Amino acid sequence: SDVIGELNRRRCRVTGMESRAGFQVSTVNVPLSEMFCYSNDLRSATKGTDKYSMQFNNYHEEPQQMADEIVARATGMTA
């Protein structure tokens, strides 16, 4: 679906999918840094019909290349 496609672009890992009261519920893990502006993108992709919620799951070490890019952005240096 468009929603899962959008989440995949944000490096998600799907951990579950189920139907609840006629709705499809997807449980995914996504890095917090990838979730900025997600509500706007979700609203656009679904014409405002879908909702989402977030809760902390765990800390996870980033691959070195991604960590270097994050540090470079945070310090104003180029990676």
Image (spheres, grey):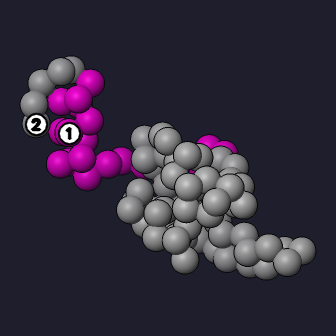
The disc placed on residue 26 is none
Q: Which residues are magenta?
A: 55-74
Q: Is residue 32 visible?
A: no
Crowding at dot 2, Cα within 10 Å, few <14 / some 14-19 / many 20+, comes out as few
Kind of residue sitting beneath label 1: Glu
Mark 2 in CB contact with mark 1 (< 8 angstroms): yes
**Residue at horizontal 59 percent and vertical 46 percent from the top:** 39
Crowding at dot 1, Cα within 10 Å, few <14 / some 14-19 / many 20+, comes out as some
- Say what secondary structure mark 1 lies in: helix
Between residues 66 and 50, which one lies in front from this camera angle? 50
Between residues 7 and 72, which one lies in front from this camera angle? 7
Between residues 61 and 3, which one lies in front from this camera angle? 3
Where does the image place residue 14, in percent across and percent down from the top left?
54, 70
> If the image is split into quadrants, where does the N terminus sit?
bottom right
Q: Is residue 3 magenta?
A: no
> In the image as oriented, which residue stretches furthest toward the left?
78
- Say what secondary structure mark 2 lies in: loop
Q: How many marks?
A: 2
The disc placed on residue 79 is 2
**Residue at horizontal 41 percent and vertical 57 percent from the top:** 10
Q: CA distance from mark 2 to mark 1?
A: 5 Å
Residue identifier under label 1? 69
As drawn, is 73 to the left or to the right of 59?
left
Q: Is residue 5 visible?
A: yes
Whichever of labels 2 and 1 marks the residue nearer the N terminus, that label is: 1
Where does the image place residue 50, in percent across and percent down from the top left?
70, 60
Where does the image place residue 59, in percent across and percent down from the top left?
48, 44
Where does the image place residue 74, in percent across and percent down from the top left?
26, 24
**Residue at horizontal 10 percent and vertical 36 percent from the top:** 79
Kind of residue sitting beneath label 2: Ala
